[in-house]
């Protein structure tokens, strides 16, 4: 088989800002794995600097993974994943792109969508939230208006203006379910003050209030919090989960962190074994990346798969989240197509 890859630039409708900063241009790596008979699968890497990757490092790593793919056959997912793990630690997004392309190829050969291969019922997918990034008041109000079709909003906090942001959004969206993501920006004491306020605004849960390494802080906050706490930056792969049991209520899985659908499935199993809830999130992604995650979504309690919905133009079609309802394509493999 042959692995080819390219870096693609995406633009979001609006500058997308979180506690760590903002951008309107996002680069991702699209991967194609083609077998000798011409059958192919596609996958996407969404590298994040926060996890030690960028599109250029991912391209270098993918070039090396191509040497594994060259000698492998398209059914050997276990062997390929193991080989990639021996070659590079981390680099979750590059690994995920390869695994997604292999699954896409496998599903196409079997003539079934991935959710069916995994025995899942697409109607069991939870609603997806739509994210409102950090912005000044007028823009914030406009963003909430623009998101009218979504009954479920995820609000990015972790700024000096958090109290105003949540008040403004609750004013604009009195009946919507609101979730909050602090992106690791708070201290334990500030988190408890904020959570008391968020609780008054009937927020559903809080994602990653503290820096990822502050596990005891998370336990302290969770023990005193009326709202559930979900770990995102603290939880990359399945082996991160046992130490978070009893520390947070749930985990947020991202393909870009964990290395692909196989590790995501392991994370779901480990989280369930520890009686934790499971969410799946995303980066700014095309429909290739979002659709890969969407096929797993029937296994989730919470979904935040709006990465492609935030784009000004999506180079692919695939899963959609109209009105927060996740629709997973029923074509073979990922079921994505060039737009
Ligand atoms: Mg998050």
Image (spheres, rainbow, N blue to C red):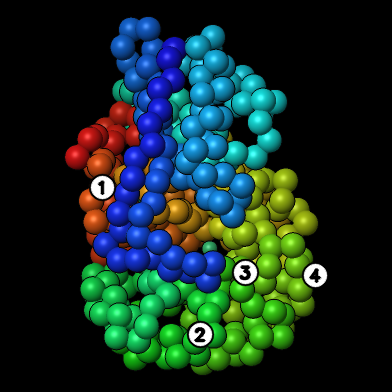
Residue 175 visible to an observer of this rendering: no
User: In which quadrant is the N terminus drawn?
Assistant: top left
Query: Considering the numbered disc 1 on the image, is that residue within a helix, a strand or a loop?
Result: loop
The local crowd at label 3, few if under 14, some if 14 to 19, many if 20 or more residues have their Cα within 10 Å, is many
Residue 329 visible to an observer of this rendering: yes
Q: Residue 221's image quarter?
A: bottom right
Query: Which residue is rendered at x = 56% and y = 30% of the image?
Result: 61
Q: Residue 277's image quarter?
A: bottom right
The circle on residue 216 is 4
Where in the figure is residue 159, as x and y percent of width and height?
53, 80
Tell me: residue 294, above or below residue 41. below
Where in the figure is residue 98, as x and y percent of width and height?
48, 29
Name the foreground residue: 304 vs 15.
15
Q: List the single residue furthest toward the left.
A: 339
Query: Considering the numbered disc 4 on the image, is that residue within a helix, a strand or a loop?
Result: helix
The circle on residue 184 is 3
Name the foreground residue: 80 vs 161.
161
The local crowd at label 2, few if under 14, some if 14 to 19, many if 20 or more residues have their Cα within 10 Å, is some
Query: Considering the numbered disc 2 on the image, is that residue within a helix, a strand or a loop?
Result: helix
3D distance between C-alphas at marks 1 and 2 = 31 Å
42 relative position to 207: left or right: left
Q: Which residue is mark 1?
A: 314
């Amino acid at each position: 088989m042959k692995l080819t890859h390219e870096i693609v630039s995406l633009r979001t409708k609006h500058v997308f800002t979180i506690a760590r900063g903002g951008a309107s241009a996002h680069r991702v790596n699209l991967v194609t794995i083609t077998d000798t008979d011409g059958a192919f699968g596609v996958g996407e890497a969404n590298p994040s600097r926060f996890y030690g990757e960028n599109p250029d490092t991912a391209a270098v790593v993918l070039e090396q993974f191509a040497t594994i793919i060259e000698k492998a056959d398209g059914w050997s997912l276990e062997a390929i994943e193991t080989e990639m793990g021996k070659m590079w630690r981390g680099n979750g997004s590059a690994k995920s792109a390869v695994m997604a392309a292999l699954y896409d190829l496998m599903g196409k050969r079997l003539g079934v969508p991935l959710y069916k291969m995994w025995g899942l019922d697409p109607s069991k997918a939870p609603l997806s939230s739509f994210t409102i990034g950090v912005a000044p008041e007028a823009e914030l109000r406009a963003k909430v208006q623009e998101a009218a079709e979504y009954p479920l909003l995820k609000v990015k906090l972790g700024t000096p203006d958090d109290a105003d942001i949540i008040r403004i959004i609750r004013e604009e969206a009195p009946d919507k379910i609101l979730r909050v993501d602090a992106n690791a920006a708070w201290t334990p004491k500030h988190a408890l003050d904020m959570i008391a306020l968020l609780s008054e605004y009937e927020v559903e849960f809080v994602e990653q209030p503290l820096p990822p390494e502050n596990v005891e802080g998370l336990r302290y906050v969770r023990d005193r919090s009326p709202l559930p706490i979900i770990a995102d930056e603290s939880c990359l792969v399945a082996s991160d989960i046992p130490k978070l049991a009893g520390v947070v209520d749930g985990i947020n899985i991202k393909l870009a962190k964990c290395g692909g659908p196989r590790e995501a499935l392991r994370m779901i199993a480990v989280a369930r074994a520890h009686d934790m809830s499971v969410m799946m999130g995303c980066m700014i992604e095309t429909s290739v990346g979002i659709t890969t995650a969407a096929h797993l979504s029937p296994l989730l309690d919470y979904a935040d798969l709006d990465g492609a919905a935030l784009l000004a133009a999506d180079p692919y079609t695939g899963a959609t989240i109209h009105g927060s309802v996740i629709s997973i394509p029923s074509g073979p493999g990922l079921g994505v197509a060039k737009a």
